[in-house]
Structures are given as C-alpha cells and as structure tokens.
Image (spheres, helix red, strand yellow):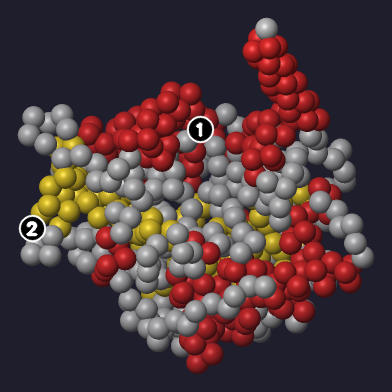
Amino acid sequence: MAAALFRLRRFVALVSSGLALAWLAASARLPPPQPPPVLTSATTDVADTDLGRLAAQDAPQGGAAGLSGFRLLPEAAFAFDARISLARHAQKSLDVQYYLISNDDVGLLFLKELREAAARGVRVRLLVDDLYTAGEDEVFSSLSAFPNIEVRLFNPLPSRAGSLAARLLFSLGDFGRINHRMHNKLLVADNSFAVSGGRNIANEYFMRSTAANFIDMDVLSSGPIVRRMSEGFDRYWNSEHAWPIERIAPRRVPVEEAQRRFDTLARAAVPDVPMRQRDILNKSPLGEQLTTGRIDRYWAPATLFVDDPDKITRKAEAAYGGSVTEGALGVIQAAKHEVKIGSPYFIPGARGMAMMKATIERGGRITVVTNSLGATDEPLAYAGYERYRADMLKIGVTIYEIAPTLTGRSGRFGDFGKSISRLHAKLAIVDDERFFVGSMNLDHRSAAVNTEMGLVIDSPRLVQDYDKLMNGERVNLGYRLRLAPGGRRVQWLEYDDAGGDIVHEDEPGEFLWLRFKNWLLLPIVGEELL
C-alpha cells in the first residue's frame, strides 16, 4: 500500500510539474507591438577617414576599378586582432552582426572595444541573434547605456530566463521562433573594411578555450564589396525581426549605474595572448599594417550573397529560393574540374548528392573536409552526415575527417595545447580559381531555416594561400576515408610518420554511448532540425 501510494504521489508530482512547466511556457510572451524603431543606414561619407583612405590606397584604376581587396584570416589570433584593430581605428561607424557573442574573455574584450570606440564618438550598431543571450541581458543592456551605442536582438525568444535550457522550455509555445536564427557574422568599420566568415565571438573561436577550439576562416574585405555588406546589414538592422534591447530587457537601474556595471564586467576579461610577428601565410597583423599604412590584400571581383531577413518566416522551399545556399551551390555546380569543400556540419541531402554526382559524371573531382565524430560539437549533425557518407564514397567523392588531436600537431592553425581541435570553417574552392567563404554550412538548416551570408571571390592567388594552409593535396589533419573491400564498410586511414597509412576498420575512438544516443534521437529529431 505504501509503495503504491508513493508511486501515485510521484505520478501526481510529475504531472503537476509538467502542467506547471507547460503553463509557464505558454505564459512567456514578447511585449505587445510598438512603433518601429528609427530607421538608420550605413555611414557613407567616409572618404576622409583613416580607414577610408587606407581602403582606397593602391586600389586598381581604369577598367579594374570595380575590384575589391581581400586577405584570408585563418589564424585565430590574427583574426581577433583584425576585429580589435578595426574597432580602434574606426572614426565614424561600427556595424556589428553576430550569431553569438559570449560573456567570456573574448566576448567582453570585444564589447569593451566597441564601448571605447563609442566614447570617441563612433556610432556603434550591434545586432546579435537572441538564441544564446541567456543570462547576458545585463551585459548587452548595460552596454547600450553608453552614448553612441545601440543594441538590437534578432528574433528574440519570449522567455528571458537565465539559462538556455529554461529559455527554450519556456518559449516552446512559439517553437518556430526558437528554430529560426540569424547565423550571419560581420563587422564593418567606417564602411571601408569588413571582417566576415565563420567565427563567432567566444573563447573557443580564438584559441582561448582549454577544452576545445575551432579551426575557422575569416576574410578581410575592402573596396566596393564592403558597401554591399553594409547594405545587407541595414536590411537586418531595420527589419521587424530586430528588436531594440530596451523593449525586451529594459534597464532597471539608472544609466550611470548601468555603465559602471558594464565596466566592472569588462575589467574581468583576461587580456589576449601575444601573437607571432607573421601568420602562416607570412603576413603581419592587420593592426600593424593599419599603423604603417600598407595593407596586404589581393584585388579581385567578388559576389556577395546575403539572405533576406524575412527568410525566417518562410517555409523550406520558399526559403531556399534566392538563399545563400542556392547561390553557393550554383557556383559549385558551375565547376569544370574540381571542387574542394570544407563544412563542419555536412548533410548534403538529395539536392547536394545530385549536385556532386552530376559534377563527378562530368569528369570533375570533389573533396569534402568535415569533422570526425570525435571532433564534432554536434553529434546529431554527424549522424545526419553519416547517412550519406558511404554513398558519397561510392560515387567518387574524396572525404577527409578532422581528428580531435591530430590537427594540433601541424601548428598551422595555432597552438591547441591539450584542447580538442574542431572544424568550423565554411568554404569551397572551385577550379582553383574561385573561393567561397561565409557563415553557411552545407545542410538543411543553412539552406532553409537560418539566415546566412557568404562571399565568392574570383582570386587564384587567394586559392593558393588556402592550398598553403592545407599542405597541397595531402590533408594531414585527420583521416582519409575509403570503402573497404566489398564496398559496404567504411575505413579510416591515418597517415603515419613514414608517409604510409594506418588503417582503422572502425571509427577511431570510443563512441558506443554517443552512437546509441544518436540512434535513439535522430528518428525523433529529423534531418530538417539538425
């Protein structure tokens, strides 16, 4: 009897808790509609700024006047220096758009530079996707208390709970809002220079995490392409999906107190570690070049793809039309000889498989570099890719998987120490002539759910720089995959020190529990949510 009563009480408690949580989820609401905020646009009178003059310096003239300047930023320290240095040299405007800015050393150092730029009179517009701002409302609201700084959150969740799990739970009544995110990454300084690519603003993207760090890729841009980036930023900034932070997380203290709180938070950030004098591509830091007035860059034509901010309101097929993914796949499909793809979450789907098969049947070669199961931070996404892995090998795709520890041995992407190395770069090289880099993964989420941006740069010299990073055709950062005799099983080949291969018949590492969870969850989640 006692045991039965206990079970009954436990059942009632669980039901009651579930009902309470459901009520809380349903009760989370965004504020009622208000008049739209004041529309603003990118600063255009920048020719007389220091960055404006440097951007125009050595620019091609005559028939090549429409070319833009580009430099790859593969190393974390140099990529962070580029962002910080542009913020320090800006005189009129900083337009900043990110999927994620963490409340950690990198995030606080970055936000501190924005605050200091604003103190010099620079107009700062900061747009952040709201998914990962849980517990950080005070950071952003206190930052917006300074003059010349405005902060907006993209597609905010109804709940302002302090943890991500609680926010998601209490926002379940509006799941569509949870699922659709702004994945763009962009910083524009004085409408003259821009940094875009794959990196968010957090420790793990800049080699500051002790657990795991990302291999990533950004590009520095100058010239006409930056104006188009600014136009894209304006569309997001003035979108109905961009909410002033004061509307959804109003300050509860006087302005002066909010400013003091931000300064207290920012002082806690540990300064960055020193950089080498030159990066792996033998280029000095951008901060040094801005000071000396000599900027390393290649001049080339380029195409910018930016998703419409209203993409988050559309169904899958409509969202794909005109998307960054559609544009990128169009460039890849036009390949005559070879395509090299880097994507941390590679789930090609039927559309991607058809594209690769058609390219190979025309005599082209396709190489894919993605994460191994041991390296990925999204095991479910890996399970989605695993569905296509053997079929890709069968049609002739060359596949490499980044290993969690092998990458650090090369030293080409920085000092990983004892941390795990993970791929996060999103790029493609077409015919050794065209270079795509952006925020877009080759998966359904980037194609039809999130917003993205990407650049296609027609520069063989930029491709040559990338090939230097990858050590030519021999990708020694992990495993090369092949089909075992009989064509049913996959083998993983690891280069040994003598130049031969170590053959792994099973996926390297111990992943029994992880694979069981993937097997259990993947049918429930579905590929469209990965």
Name the spot of residue 82 as percent of width and height, x first.
52, 75
The vertical placement of 194 against 18, above or below, is below
Name the spot of residue 185 as percent of width and height, x first.
55, 58
The vertical placement of 295 against 394, above or below, is below
Amino acid type, callout 1: Leu
Q: CA distance from mark 2 to mark 1?
A: 40 Å
Using the rendered image of the protein, determine whether residue 335 is visible from the camera's viewpoint.
Answer: no
The vertical placement of 242 against 456, above or below, is above
Using the rendered image of the protein, determine whether residue 387 is visible from the camera's viewpoint.
Answer: yes
Which is more toward the observer, 61 or 118?
Answer: 118
Residue drawn where x is 79% and y is 34% of the image: 28
Residue drawn where x is 37% and y is 69% of the image: 417
Name the spot of residue 276 as percent of width and height, x first.
40, 83
Residue drawn where x is 92% and y is 65% of the image: 254
Q: Relative to residue 227, is residue 498 drawn left or right?
A: left
Q: Which mark is residue 358?
A: none
Q: Residue furthest bottom?
A: 292
Q: Quadrant of the N terminus?
A: top right
Which is in the foreground here, disc 2 or disc 1? 2
Sequence-wise first label, 2 or 1: 2
Name the spot of residue 286 as percent of width and height, x first.
48, 81
